[in-house]
Each structure stands twice: as C-alpha cells, then as structure tokens.
Image: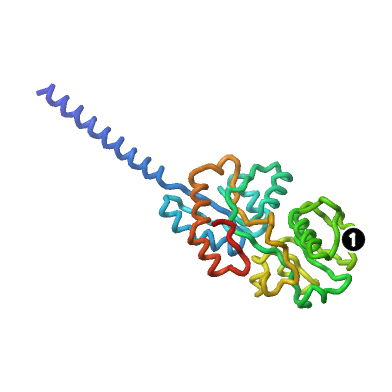
Amino acid sequence: MLALLVAIVAGCGQNNNADKQNNQAANEGKDAQEVNLKVAVLIPPMSEILELVKPLLKQDGINLEIVTLSDNVQPNTALQHKEVDANFFQHVPYMNDFNATNKGTLVPVKAIYNAVYGGYSKKYKKIEDLPDGATIAIANDPSNIGRSLLMLENNGLLKLKEGVGIKATQADIVDNPHKFKFQEVDLLMLARVIDDVDMVLMTPAYAKPLGLTPKNDALITEGKDSDFVITLVAREDNVDSPAIQKLAERMTGPEVKKFLDDNYSDIALPAFE
C-alpha cells in the first residue's frame, strides 16, 4: 500500500509538471506570435498610410504603434536611440545628413512615394510676376536647402557653383540676377510664413493644408526624376527583421497604392509598382 501511495503521488507530481510545461510552452508560443512595432511619423499623408496598414499588420501578428512627433528632428533621434523601431517622414538625403551629423546608423528600407517640391505664393500667380529682390522662404536643413536652390537653378532663376548639386548652400550661388533674398526656416514652419514672404518652397504635404497643389498652384516645380522620395527608414541593426520587412511589404501593397491614387494623386506619386 505504501508503494502504491508513493507511485500515485509521484504520478500527480509528474502530471502537474507536465501541465506547467505545456502552459508555459503555450504562453511562449503566443508571445512569439505577437510582435510590437513602433513607428514615428509627423503629418499626413504619412500618418494616414500607417493607419491604413495597421489592421493589415494585425493580421500578420504585428501590433503597430504610431508615434506622432512634433518636429522634424525627433523622429530620427528617437529611432537612433531605439525609442522607436522605424520612422516614415523623410527622404534619403535628409537621413544621410542626420547620419553624418550624429554618427547615425539609419538606413532606408523602402521608397514609398514621390512628393513633388514646388514654389508657392499668396501674392503672385506666375513666376514671371515675382519681382527682383523678392524674399523666398526655404527649409533650413542642409538637404532641403540644396533641394530648394537646385530647383531654382533648374528653372533658370539663379546659377550655382558647378557640381554642387543637392549639397548647395547660399554660399554656392554664383549668379543671382533677380537679387532674391532667402529666409531659412524650420521645415514645419514653411506653410506658416507664406503670408510674410513672396514665395515659399516646400513639399506638397505642407502645401495641401493651405489648399495648394503642385499641379494647380505651384509657380515652379522640380523635375520628376527626384532623389527626394519619401522613404520608410529603420536602423542597421533591425532593417532585416521580419517585422520591418513585413511593414515595408504592407506599405507598398495595393491598398496603399489605391489610397494614394484616390486621395493624393495631385501631390504623391507611388514609388512602387
């Protein structure tokens, strides 16, 4: 009887251990299936694209948290410090400038859409009407300074030092026949100064809230072959992770293409097939 009792107790212990192991394995399996992904963003349509793919990623076992920040420095700083896993607000030249200045390790994941840069004015309807000595507002970060000056050169309004391209600064202007003056302001302030200057050079994301589009309202635009495609960005250490790659896949899917075609065809051209 004593031997039988010992066997029964031992068997119960083994069953309890087995149950614990099974429950632990089930919980670990559940945790392994769920992935949390934080992505920093600033404004529409970038934020809207992330909202669109959020339920699609849920089907893939990825919980997308969209982190909306208030200036164009925080998204890269947060990504570099691993406070978020990716960001979606910038073009590659801007990312490269951040890396060079901050010893960053940010890398492009996928190009999402082309945002046509343009020059907008509340005072003038045509570029020919822009007077000599006009004040033009441009973004104050290096990549967008170069982008703005290059657009002006390509439209025959000034001449830059040969070969400077998108790295141009005001110091590289070798001929300014119209004596334009330049006011460098924060990227997020461009739309707010349009009443105070003669022309503002900015992306359509900042022009659209003012009711302005490149096609209908811009006095000048840059060419279609642009280096400034709005891109999903991650870090060197996580760019190849399954969650980031699935995010890139969803952001270049038919749902996003249709969304851009239906809602932003005048300002955002998909950079994927």
Based on the displayed image, in which of its 4 quarters is residue 237 positioned? top right
Q: Quadrant of residue 133?
A: bottom right
Q: If the image is split into quadrants, where does the C terminus sit?
A: bottom right
Q: Find residue 58 and report its horizontal and vertical position in percent.
A: 43, 54
Q: Nearer the viewer, residue 98 or 93?
A: 93
Taking depth in this image into account, of 156 and 7 the one nearest to the observer is 156
Q: In the orientation shown, which residue stands out farthest toward the left?
A: 1
Residue shown at the point (55%, 42%) measured from the top left: 238
| Residue behind mark 1 | 175
Residue at (58, 51) in percent of width and height: 110
Identify the secondary structure beneath mark 1: strand
The quarter of the picture where the N terminus appears is top left
Percent x, y of residue 98: 70, 48
Q: Is disc 1 surrounded by few (<14), some (14 to 19) or many (20+) residues within 10 Å?
A: few
Q: Residue 136: x and y, percent?
A: 81, 67
Q: Residue at 63%, 67% (x, y): give it.
A: 267
Residue 142's x, y, as percent? 76, 53
Amino acid on which disc 1 is placed: Asp
Q: Residue furthest top?
A: 3
Above/below status of 182 relative to 63:
below
